[in-house]
Amino acid sequence: MRLPAKTGYAIRALFHMAFFGRGERVQAKEIAERQRIPLRYLEEVLQDLRRAGLVLASRGPRGGYVLARPPESISVGDIMRALGGLAGDWFDAEPSVDDSEPAPRVLPLPAGEVDIPALLGRDLARRIEAALDAVSLRDYLQRAEAEGLEASGAPLMYFI
């Protein structure tokens, strides 16, 4: 399974704030450069995260972004919901078809029949959402530290 690019960028940005920011405001430019995320796209992602209450933003020379909640209370599910999509959107009972062919006509089930593909899709979506909600940003911080990543490096400096 592959996460959408927007979700990956959001996770990387939040990780950066938690791991390298350590509670201090981090500028979008720093996140974009260090995480190799296009700045314009990152700003859109950060606005979605701000609207969802996952980050706080402030303007000005000392402005930037900071986590709005502790890392252990931000799940991957929260991040995906902030960006407008979660597992429930991944499963569709309608058959997927190639655009070059006319879509098959989906006939309604007779009364009393059960739509098994729809039930399966809803069940899988619930299980995936539960799994995504069980993984927190804190889990990624701990894994990074176990892998030897150090946050002690000096912050990026910008000179003109």
Image (cartoon, rainbow, N blue to C red):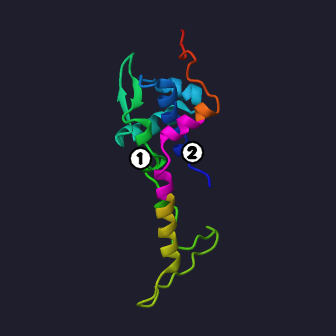
What's the amino acid at mark 1? Ala
- Give the magenta-colored segment's residue range: 129-143
Is the N terminus in the top left, top right, bottom left or bottom right quadrant?
Answer: bottom right
Q: In the rendered structure, find residue 82 and report the number of the disc placed on it.
A: 1
Q: In the rendered structure, find residue 5 and report the number of the disc placed on it.
A: 2
Q: Is residue 26 magenta?
A: no
Rate crowding at label 2 as few (under 14), some (14 to 19) or many (20 or more) other CA atoms within 10 Å.
Answer: few
Is the residue 16 above or below the residue 154 in the image?
below
Q: In the rendered structure, find residue 47 and report the number of the disc placed on it.
A: none
State whether residue 36 appears in this view: no
Percent across and percent down for residue 50 are 37, 37
Percent across and percent down for residue 65 are 41, 28
How would you classify the magenta stretch by its main secondary structure?
helix
Q: Nearer the viewer, mark 1 or mark 2?
A: 1
Q: Residue at x 56, y 23 (%)?
A: 151
Compare residues 158 and 142 and report the one nearer the observer.
Answer: 142
Q: CA distance from mark 1 to mark 2?
A: 14 Å
Is the residue 86 above or below the residue 27 in the image?
below
Is the C terminus in the top left, top right, bottom left or bottom right quadrant?
Answer: top right
- Badge 1 marks a residue whose secondary structure is helix
Percent across and percent down for residue 55 are 39, 35
Q: Residue at x 46, y 54 (%)?
A: 85
Compare residues 46 and 150 and report the one nearer the observer.
Answer: 150
- Badge 2 marks a residue whose secondary structure is helix
Q: Is residue 135 magenta?
A: yes
Q: Residue at x 40, y 29 (%)?
A: 66
Mark 1 vs 2, N-terminal side: 2
Compare residues 56 and 39 and report the one nearer the observer.
Answer: 56
Q: Is residue 4 left or right of residue 55?
A: right
What's the amino acid at mark 2? Ala
